[in-house]
Image (cartoon, rainbow, N blue to C red):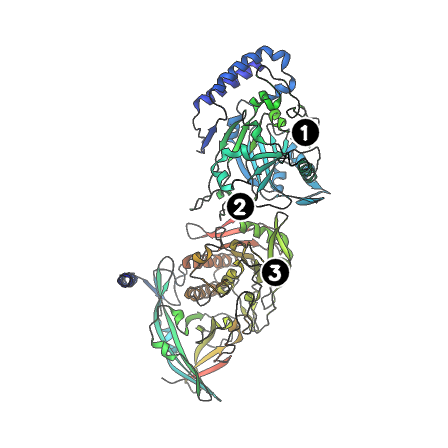
Amino acid sequence: MHVKKLTTYLVQNFLFVSNNTAVFDSRKKKLLILKQKNMLKVKRVAMKLLGMCLLLSSVISCQQDDVYHQSDNSVSEFTEGKTSVMNQNELMNRYSGDNLGGLLKNSFEQEKSIQKTMSSGSTPVYIDLDHIQVFESPNMHAITYHVVIGDIDKNINGEPQTRYNLVYYSKDYINYYVTLLRYDFSTTSLERFIQNPSDIMSMLSFVPLNDIENIYDNIAYSYSEGLRSTTEINPISFPQFIDLSDCAELVVEEGTPCAGRAKHEYGESCSKIGSERATPSSTYMDFSDCFDSPIFGGGGSGGGGGSFPGTPTPDPEPINPIKGNPIKKIGDFVYVGDFFAQINIGNNNQNVKTLKAIKRDIKADLQDFNSNLNLAIEIGKGYQFKTINGVYSLSLPSFNLQNPSLQKPKIDMTKARAYLCGVFHTHPIKLGSQNHKHAPLFSPADLRAIFRFTNASSIVSDRKPSEAFIGVVNKYGAYVVMLPNDVTQDNIATKYEDFISTNNNGRIFGDEDKKVWKEIEADLNDKYRKIDNSSTLDENEKKVEHEKTLLEVMRDKGLELNLYFLAKDEGEFDGSWQKVSLNTYGGVQYTTIN
Amino acid sequence: MKKIFLLLFTALFTFTTQAQSYTTVDRYDYPDDIRYGETGYYFKDTQGYLDQYLGNWQYESGNLKIQMRFVKKTMIRYNVSGTSKTDLLVGGMIIRKNNVTVMSTIASVNQTKDYMSEYFIFGGTRFNNYSDCYNCTVPEQRVVMNYREPDNDNRAFKDLFFRIHVYMNAQNEPRLRLEFTQEALQGRDPNWYDAEFGDTAPTKTTLHLPFGTYDFEKID
């Protein structure tokens, strides 16, 4: 049976190698088949098969049997699999009754709540639980988390020099192998890697994990232990995949650009969300031939387990699969037989990062604003957000905007400090001493104010224009306008030249003297009033009409701003953000943001 | 060569603009499925609603004298996708204090501008009837006018507005009521500037037209 399995595998492998053509699956994804060895290897494999058959009964152990237990259809498992993005709650709900669910619960929970970040000694570990890449096929399963360890060193491109991914990998949805992959970007860029995914073997290493159940403890301890072995003689402390490059076979599936006109690649700023996002390439690594690799201690005439570092560690029949099997040495990958890698850099959509931070960190303020909509004045606060230990979060203190009076009931947003990321304020139902109706959505003054917060300065030297926001809480819920993710300090002046000017300090601001703002004022005022005064539209229809009006006016005047909405949800603001946009038929569509 | 090119471009642009056809709708009573300012439409004052404001008006109280003139103009509005046309009121003012002219913008009314915002007083947005109309009297309508003063360097004084409406007094004489309140500042403090942001202290910190309510008489 075993020999038959081998033969079948070899024949398939031979055919696979002989063809050496691009294979397209039903979704027409481009597939690159890369060989790390030349065609002569096929002959060597055939010779080995003969030798191995002869030595099979006396040499090959149960453990080595497992090297060949991988499915003959592993490559098809890889090519037919699908990747989706989930957050931790969705992931745990999906697999709540399965081994993975139990494994994740044991790994991530402490005192019955999911940890998001943890400092262990001097090693803070952050695991992004909002943007998890989940690869699924019938007999191949990979969960990939974006991990940040300690401070982020930047390479010459200003990108993180090292990126970590925590991967849970299984071939049967029962036993999971856990590893912390380490991508080295010290001499390359993410863009180059996206264009040349076959470079993965030269840049990939991993942090050997330990038998520690809590994953944060495990990563912090294992990482520190790994650094401890760094010396001047041995500056590279983590095992590298390059050591298996002579025997490993790779199958690479290229990623897809985002659905926008610009076709941004993975890693580039893009406004698209959900299934329209760019996807990274994925790599299937077959280590079955590495059993003979010198690194494993084996020779051409027969296998046999080698000594350090190749000795496989995990038990073939784990006693408690719930704990998972940490990868401790390079040989463990050979034991497993294959692996899956698909880089996860987290969600680089700045708009989404800001929205998530708003909902997580200033929800109490949104609730407070909502409870004060009966006041006849606007109230508001300014906020700054920063990346702290890998998490884009509120940086205290918030900035209280001066309370206006009934005679001057509107907030002056130009009084908010320019280093802030943005302002949230109320649009109450009635305004001023005369109690007249207040348009629920953004005024032209609100829209102009966003440019104030796009400026970099000595306080915020790395400010991205797409971080700036203006928020309003009204009777429908919370709305936010933001600049698209692809707006940079270099292109903002050109993209918005009709709307902004630059002051003597080189700071950008929305210039009310620009003609377009007068027209926007007239358009919005006129249409807003028509909606508010309508006796035929119900409240929900008025909400949609307000949104449609704002989007149409901005579109017509070329003012590119993204509009987002969070329903008040009985005053709790517990739901999900939605992107509000116009569809091709001129109606309003809502896209939920995960 | 550059001048010739510019001339040709302007001519082409003008020709193109004038060649565009517009569907005429009423300035205030247009169909619900189109938006004010929508490309390809001419929002025309077909009912002559703005005519009641046309002409010269004056106000006098104590040492303050104000003369105001309104005309009706048809302006092109520019969108990304094309243009629309609209009728609007354009105005100017002379303000005298203690018989000294402190501001005069009436002459601008007779000038031809490419953009409405180049006029010192312009507008035409109408508040329709609704139950909580601000300071409304019969008829319950007001027209909102954009207002700015010349030589202004104060951001709090940009984007001002006042409301007007015409009524008949007890002697059946037309009066134009102008309401100019602190609301026009839209929350901005005329004395505030952000030095950190690069603002410099404004030189103009008071307006020539004081906040208040004015009843103008019709001159002609």
Please tell me which of labels 2 and 1 falls first in the chain. 2
Alpha-carbon span between mark 1 and mark 3: 49 Å
Reply above or below: B170 against B159: below
Foreground pick, A373 / A172: A172
Foreground pick, B143 / B198: B198
- Where is the N terminus of chain A found, in terms of image quarters? top right
Q: Are there few (<14), some (14-19), or many (20+) residues within 10 Å of tag 2?
A: few
Identify the chain of the residue marked 1, using the numbered disc in the image. A
Q: Mark 1 points at which residue?
A: A321
Q: Can residue A409 be seen in this snapshot?
A: yes
Please tell me which of labels 1 and 3 falls first in the chain. 1
SS class of the residue under badge 3?
Answer: helix
Foreground pick, A268 / A177: A268
Q: In this view, does A354 lie to the left or right of A582?
A: right
Give the image location of residue A18, x and y in percent. 44, 21
Reply above or below: A429 against A562: below
